[in-house]
Image: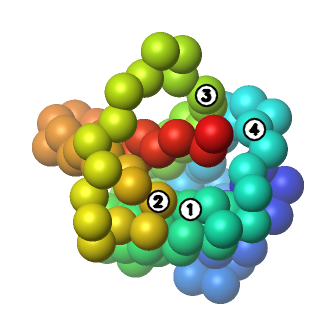
Amino acid sequence: MRQTMVPTLMSFCNVDTRRIVPKIRAQDVQLPINAAVPCGLIINEPVCNVLKHAFPQNRGGEIEIDFRRAPGMQLLSLPTDQLGAEMSIEHAHPTQFSLRFSIG
């Protein structure tokens, strides 16, 4: 994710990297392919929305992405979610989007 996904999305959305700066904290978490693909899709949507809509009138800012393994986590399984993930959105300054899922 750190090396390709976010920079590729920023390039695709024609983002001025001097104006919008990604801050990515990603642990080396190995995911099986059946978890990696939906995880990438889930990350893609909010990041694209932020790049397209969160910085109107050439405003600048940062996008923070924190991808890490959380110890001792218990998950709620949602039958429609391929990952069995728990998602939360906190509308604050800044808005925070969290996705938690088990890989093992």
**Contact check, label 4 and label 3, Cβ < 8 Å:** yes
Is residue 95 placed above or below 59 in the rendered structure?
A: above
The residue drawn where x is 39% and y is 55% is: 84
Q: Which mark is residue 83?
A: 2
7 on left or right of 97: right
The three-letter code of the residue at mark 2 reads Leu
The residue wearing badge 4 is: 29
The three-letter code of the residue at mark 1 reads Cys
The residue wearing badge 1 is: 39
The residue wearing badge 3 is: 69
Q: Quadrant of the C terminus?
A: top right
| 10 Å crowding of disc 3: few (<14), some (14-19), many (20+) | some
- Mark before the other along the chain sequence, 4 or 3: 4
Q: Distance between the residues labelled 3 and 2?
A: 15 Å
- Mark before the other along the chain sequence, 1 or 4: 4
**Contact check, label 3 and label 2, Cβ < 8 Å:** no
| 10 Å crowding of disc 4: few (<14), some (14-19), many (20+) | few
| 10 Å crowding of disc 1: few (<14), some (14-19), many (20+) | some
- In x, y percent, where is residue 89? 22, 46
The residue drawn where x is 81% and y is 35% is: 28
Q: Which of the two marks, 1 or 2, is nearer to us in this view?
A: 2
Q: How far apart are marks 1 and 3 (CA)?
A: 14 Å
**Contact check, label 1 and label 2, Cβ < 8 Å:** yes
The three-letter code of the residue at mark 4 reads Val
Q: Distance between the residues labelled 4 and 3?
A: 7 Å
Q: Which of 5 and 74 is in front in this view?
A: 74
Q: How far apart are marks 1 and 4 (CA)?
A: 12 Å
- In x, y percent, where is residue 39? 56, 62
Label 3 sits on a secondary structure element that is: loop
| 10 Å crowding of disc 2: few (<14), some (14-19), many (20+) | many
Label 2 sits on a secondary structure element that is: loop
